[in-house]
């Protein structure tokens, strides 16, 4: 990831929000309302779903209520809420009935620097790319993807106030790139990062001291981050067990505003969170999850020359 791409991804000016017509309007609009605090231009895309999945009253209806219906039902709160939704969407560009296979091209055309999924299942809808290979949005988007899981209460989400960031890692070749993003993102929101590593089975020749925060910190590019001027307040923690459940348990005991995952894609790659772990965390987390794909680094290198370190 080059410096310019990191800065753009941490301070996005264009955000693509993907929703499904099977969602309730309140869920989608609460997400959009919270995202407005980023200060970026928002594009809300409604993806079509099969007719048998749609439930009565779902999808985005006319947001300004029928005055006669309001008078008959005496539902003043519903009227106020509908006008509020209309005000929110007045600042958002809405694109309807766009199929999922067109999303990567749309994101590239708009210059989107972040994609937001209002439901995890949106990222897993299969489609064929330009090379006739089956893929999904999680693997095809070369920008950060923020996901709102089903266990998250969006109604209580305070919006984009990412002061406490959990950053689970598996030390490897992608760790430095992902840490640069996490630190820059934390500085953007005046936050702090908790770096968490979950050890599973102990190696035959492994010593107990190798499973300590001190040993983990020695493997991190701390000196490089300080030299580049992007170091942020940071804590290093370790635990043992199955990675997905330990990450979720850690976040329950010490709630965070955001979880950042470096995802490896469909194949297991050292230095990133595997797809099964990422999907479990996304599905069960009670806060947004921000996915960093390996394709982000390739996208940055293909569009930029190597730049000198710049202060965040």
Image (spheres, rainbow, N blue to C red):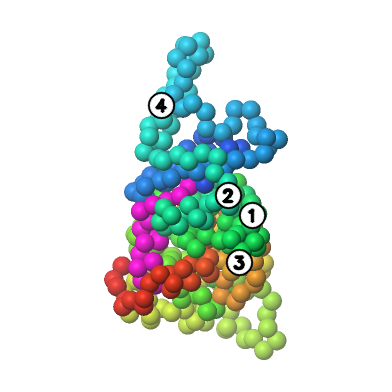
Q: Residue at x 31, y 78 (%)?
A: 308
Residue at mark 1: 127
From mark 3 to mark 1, how far is it between C-alphas? Answer: 16 Å
The answer to whether residue 51 is left or right of residue 4 is right
Residue at mark 4: 83
On residue 297, the disc is: none
Nearer the camera: disc 4 or disc 2: 2
Marks 1 & 4, CB-CB < 8 Å contact: no
Marks 2 & 1, CB-CB < 8 Å contact: yes
- Please say if 130 is above or below 207: above
What element does badge 1 sit on? strand
Q: Residue at x 29, y 73 (%)?
A: 310
From mark 1 to mark 4, how far is it between C-alphas? Answer: 37 Å
What element does badge 2 sit on? helix
13 part of magenta stretch: yes
The quadrant of the picture occupied by the C terminus is bottom left
37 part of magenta stretch: no
From mark 3 to mark 4, how far is it between C-alphas? Answer: 41 Å
Q: Residue at x 51, y 10 (%)?
A: 72
The quadrant of the picture occupied by the N terminus is bottom left
The answer to whether residue 46 is left or right of residue 109 is right
Q: Nearer the viewer, residue 57 or 149?
A: 57
Q: Nearer the viewer, residue 206 or 157?
A: 157
Circle nearer the N terminus (2, 1):
2
Circle nearer the N terminus (3, 2):
2
From mark 3 to mark 2, how far is it between C-alphas? Answer: 18 Å
On residue 265, the disc is: 3
Tell me the magenta residue range. Answer: 1-17
Q: Nearer the viewer, residue 96 or 55?
A: 96
Residue at mark 2: 100
């Amino acid at each position: 990831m080059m410096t310019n791409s990191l800065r753009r991804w941490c301070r996005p000016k264009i955000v693509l929000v993907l929703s499904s017509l099977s969602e309730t309007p309140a869920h989608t609009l609460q997400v959009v309302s919270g995202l407005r605090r980023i200060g970026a231009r928002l594009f809300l895309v409604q993806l079509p779903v099969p007719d048998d999945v749609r439930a009565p009253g779902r999808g985005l209806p006319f947001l300004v209520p029928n005055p006669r219906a309001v008078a008959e039902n005496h539902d003043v709160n519903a009227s106020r809420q509908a006008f509020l939704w209309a005000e929110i969407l007045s600042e958002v560009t809405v694109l309807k009935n766009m199929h999922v296979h067109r999303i990567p091209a749309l994101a590239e055309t708009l210059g989107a620097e972040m994609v937001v999924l209002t439901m995890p299942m949106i990222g897993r809808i299969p489609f064929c790319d330009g090379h006739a290979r089956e893929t999904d949005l999680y693997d095809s988007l070369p920008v950060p993807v923020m996901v709102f899981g089903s266990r998250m209460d969006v109604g209580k989400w305070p919006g984009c106030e990412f002061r406490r960031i959990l950053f689970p890692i598996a030390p490897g070749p992608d760790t430095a790139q992902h840490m640069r993003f996490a630190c820059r993102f934390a500085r953007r929101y005046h936050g702090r990062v908790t770096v968490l590593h979950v050890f599973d089975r102990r190696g035959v020749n492994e010593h107990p001291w190798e499973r300590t925060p001190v040993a983990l910190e020695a493997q991190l590019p701390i000196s490089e981050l300080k030299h580049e001027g992007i170091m942020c307040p940071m804590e290093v923690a370790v635990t043992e067990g199955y990675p997905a459940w330990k990450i979720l348990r850690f976040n329950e005991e010490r709630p965070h505003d955001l979880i950042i995952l470096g995802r490896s894609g469909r194949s297991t790659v050292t230095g990133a969170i595997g797809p099964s772990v990422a999907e479990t965390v996304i599905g069960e987390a009670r806060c947004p999850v921000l996915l960093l794909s390996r394709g982000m680094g390739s996208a940055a290198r293909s569009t930029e020359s190597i730049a000198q370190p710049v202060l965040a």
